[in-house]
Image (tube, helix red, strand yellow):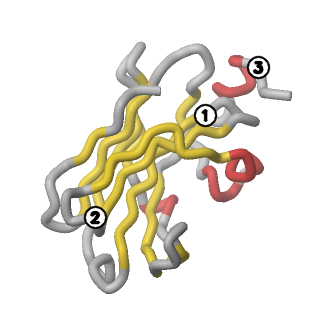
């Protein structure tokens, strides 16, 4: 059962990796760079009805590189940037590549739409479609 819109507001600003919202995360929208080494995803939690941005890059390309990004709600412009509270982690992509990923705090997305935007190292900014 999904959380109500009112319950979703209580997740605003929280680190998804420290909540149960992470367990129902799906990629709602994704943009990949021309080089294929960097991507921006709008992640949606079906359980919590929240979204966050995830910015990732392949190793060794991502090693020591800077990440920027944010998730933004269309209806009121509320936005959360990648921040120190949501540091990154190494993991493996679906194709088995070693990757570095950072994410933003969560934003309520119940009955509204949002998008994600991000930049990795010297790559151009990528922006997902709204969801």
Image x and y of residue 89, in percent: 52, 73
Q: Look at the numbered discs 2 and 3 and tell me whether their residues touch, using CB distance below 8 Å.
A: no
- The disc, 2 or 3, on the residue closer to the chain's N-terminal end is 3
Labels 2, 1: front one: 2
Residue extending furthest toward the front: 95
In the shown orientation, is residue 77 left or right of residue 6? Answer: left
Image x and y of residue 94, in percent: 54, 67
* Residue, disc 3: 4
Labels 2, 3: front one: 2
What kind of element bears circle 3?
A: loop
What kind of element bears circle 2?
A: loop
Q: Residue at x 40, y 45 (%)?
A: 30
Q: Residue at x 62, y 20 (%)?
A: 110
- Disc ID at residue 36: 2
Quadrant in the rendering for residue 62: bottom left
In the shown orientation, is residue 116 left or right of residue 126? Answer: right
- Disc ID at residue 50: 1
**Relative to 64, residue 50 above or below:** above
Along the line of sight, the residue nearer the viewer: 64 or 1: 1
Quadrant in the rendering for residue 49: top right
Along the line of sight, the residue nearer the viewer: 30 or 14: 30
Q: Estimate how packed mark 3 is, as few (under 14), some (14 to 19) or many (20 or more) residues with alpha carbons within 10 Å.
A: few
Give the CA distance from mark 3 to mark 1.
Answer: 11 Å
User: Visible in this render: residue 11?
Assistant: yes
User: Visible in this render: residue 89?
Assistant: no
Give the CA distance from mark 2 to mark 3.
Answer: 37 Å
Q: Residue at x 19, y 58 (%)?
A: 34
Give the CA distance from mark 2 to mark 1.
Answer: 27 Å
């Amino acid at each position: 059962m999904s959380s109500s819109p009112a319950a979703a507001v209580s997740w605003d600003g929280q680190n998804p990796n420290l909540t149960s919202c992470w367990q129902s995360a799906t990629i709602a929208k994704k943009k990949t760079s021309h080089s294929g080494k960097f991507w921006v995803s709008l992640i949606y939690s079906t359980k919590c009805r929240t979204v966050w941005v995830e910015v990732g890059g392949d190793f060794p390309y991502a090693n020591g590189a800077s990440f920027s990004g944010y998730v933004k709600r269309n209806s009121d412009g509320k936005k959360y940037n990648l921040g120190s509270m949501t540091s990154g982690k190494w993991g493996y992509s679906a194709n088995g590549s070693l990757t570095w990923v950072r994410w933003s705090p969560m934003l309520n997305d119940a009955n509204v739409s949002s998008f994600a935007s991000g930049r990795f190292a010297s790559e151009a900014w990528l922006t997902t479609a709204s969801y």
